[in-house]
Image: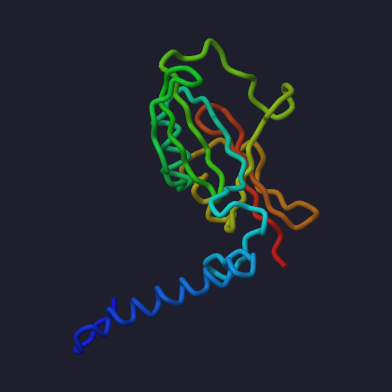
Amino acid sequence: MVTSKQPGRGFWLVGLVAWTVLCVALAACATDQPAPEPGGATPQADAAPSARIAVDVGVVVADMEQSLGFYRDLMGLPVVAEVNTSLIGKGRMVQLRHGASLIKLVEMEEAPAGRSETGIATTFGYRYITLLVTDIEAVVAKIEQGEVPITLPVTELGNGAVIVMVEDPDGNIVEFVQEARG
């Protein structure tokens, strides 16, 4: 916040900043170039300004509070929305953000009749999700603190990436990857 003994000085500064932002936006429109995003990145010219490029994952869970304890409380994913849904069957959906992607936890009013086999090599289909992280050691500390079942211990791959795989409360496999640096 701008503080000044001179009345109107803060308003003048806010006006100058707003004018600068407007000029940058107008210059971008005039040249058919997208305006820079915060931090200096320029979006792709063919992408809509509000387009989100991501992969969202829906996970049907047996106990929403237990799953939130894992994804929100232990792993630190922020909740961005919570809705009652009837599109895929009546239930409660909680959406959590990881980067540009969402993990959509769904607890059905009528529990599904059965569970899929757990494990990566047990059947065809989607078997695990991967969350890219910047500090695998911090993730591992949370995993150990929460006594989360580890299905693949910390492993460094040939390309320098470091991974660990765990089970969420429903036995779904979640892989955490810290990509190689440099």
| Residue occupying the far right of the picture | 158
Q: Quadrant of residue 117?
A: top right
Residue drawn 44% across the image and 24% down it: 107
Residue at (65% x, 54% y) in the render: 178
Q: How many marks?
A: 0
Q: Residue at x 50, y 34 (%)?
A: 104
Q: Position of residue 126 (x, y in %)?
A: 68, 29
* Image quadrant in which you'd find residue 36: bottom right
Q: Residue furthest front?
A: 30
Query: Looking at the figure, which quarter contains the C terminus?
Result: bottom right
Q: Residue furthest top?
A: 113
- The front one of 158 and 40 is 40
Q: Position of residue 66 (x, y in %)?
A: 42, 31
Q: Decide if residue 58 is on the left or right side of residue 47.
A: left
Residue 4 falls left or right of residue 132:
left
Work out which quarter of the rendered image holds the N terminus and state it: bottom left
Instruction: Find residue 127 and report its horizontal and vertical position in percent.
Output: 67, 30
Instruction: Establish if 150 lies above or below 44.
Output: above
Residue 88 at x, y = what percent?
51, 20
Which one is nearer the viewer's eye here, 148 or 118? 118
> In front: 141, or 175?
175
Position above or below: 69 against 62: below
Check the image and tell me how it is coloured: rainbow
In the visual, does 61 lie left or right of 130? left
For image coordinates 45% across by 44% down, the residue present is 74
